[in-house]
C-alpha cells in the first residue's frame, strides 16, 4: 500500500513563483469545505522571480493548479477535495487558477516507522524526515475515499497512484510539479 501513494511537490525551478494570499484565508485552514461566492484572490509570493513563469502547479503551500489539472482532478472524483476558483495577479494580468482545498485529513502517519520531531508539548510536528503511512488506518478507509488527502499531522498532500497516472498522462506533460513516492519523500524533498 505504501508504494501506491505519492506526495505532491513543486518542481525545482526558480522561475515558477510561489503564491501567497491576497485576502483573508483562515477558512481554508479548517478541515471542512469552504463556501465561496467569488474566486479567491492570490498574488505572487516573495521572492518574485525576475521573469515568473506560470506553470500548471504552484504552491501556497496548498496546491494551486491550472484548469487542465483541475479537470483531471475532477474526472478522478476525489472525495474530500474542493476545487476553488482562484484569480492570481501577475503583473497587470489576472490569471484563473484553482486552489485545491484538501479538507479530508487522515491521521495516517505511522508513528513507529516514520522519523519526525514534535515540539515539547507534543502538539506541533516540527519536522518529518521520513514518512511511512499507517496501512491499518488506510485499510479502514475505502480506496475511493482516500485517492487524495492531506495528512492530519502535517501539511503534506498525498495522492494515490491512479490519480498520479491520470495527471502525468496529460499531453503536453504538466509543468511545475513532481509526484514523489512516499517511500522517497521527506521534509527536505522540496530542496532536492
Image (cartoon, rainbow, N blue to C red):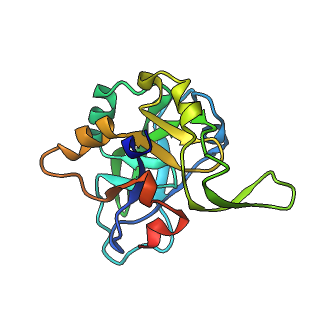
| Residue 166 horizontal/vertical position (percent) | 24, 38
| Residue 33 horizontal/vertical position (percent) | 57, 27
Residue at the extreme right of the image, as rendered: 121
Look at 49% across and 46% down and name the residue there: 157
Look at 51% across and 62% down and name the residue there: 186
In this view, 30 is above or below 89: above
Side (left or right) of 169 relative to 100 = left
Q: Which quadrant of the rendered structure holds the N terminus?
A: top left
Side (left or right) of 171 relative to 54 = left
Total labels drawn: 0
Look at 43% across and 60% down and name the residue there: 184
| Residue 124 horizontal/vertical position (percent) | 76, 54
Given residues 88 and 184, the one toward you in this image is 184
Given residues 23 and 171, the one toward you in this image is 171
Q: Which quadrant of the rendered structure holds the C terminus?
A: bottom left
Does residue 79 appear in this view?
yes
Look at 48% across and 52% down and name the residue there: 42
Amino acid at each position: 500500500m505504501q508504494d501506491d501513494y505519492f506526495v505532491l511537490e513543486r518542481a525545482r525551478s526558480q522561475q515558477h513563483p510561489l503564491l501567497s494570499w491576497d485576502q483573508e484565508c483562515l477558512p481554508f485552514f479548517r478541515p471542512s469545505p469552504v463556501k465561496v461566492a467569488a474566486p479567491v484572490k492570490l498574488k505572487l509570493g516573495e521572492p518574485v522571480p525576475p521573469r515568473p513563469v506560470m506553470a500548471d502547479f504552484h504552491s501556497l503551500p496548498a496546491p494551486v493548479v491550472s484548469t487542465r489539472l483541475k479537470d483531471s482532478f475532477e474526472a478522478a472524483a476525489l472525495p474530500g477535495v474542493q476545487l476553488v476558483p482562484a484569480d492570481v495577479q501577475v503583473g497587470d494580468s489576472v490569471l484563473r487558477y484553482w486552489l485545491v482545498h484538501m479538507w479530508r485529513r487522515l491521521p495516517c502517519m505511522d508513528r513507529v516507522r516514520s522519523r519526525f520531531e514534535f515540539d515539547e508539548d507534543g502538539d506541533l510536528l516540527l519536522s518529518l524526515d521520513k514518512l511511512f503511512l499507517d496501512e491499518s488506518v488506510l485499510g479502514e478507509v475505502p480506496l475511493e475515499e482516500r485517492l487524495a488527502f492531506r495528512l492530519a499531522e502535517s501539511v503534506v498532500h498525498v495522492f494515490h497512484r491512479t490519480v498520479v497516472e491520470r495527471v502525468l498522462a496529460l499531453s503536453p506533460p504538466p509543468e511545475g510539479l513532481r509526484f514523489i513516492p512516499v517511500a522517497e519523500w521527506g521534509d527536505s524533498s522540496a530542496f532536492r
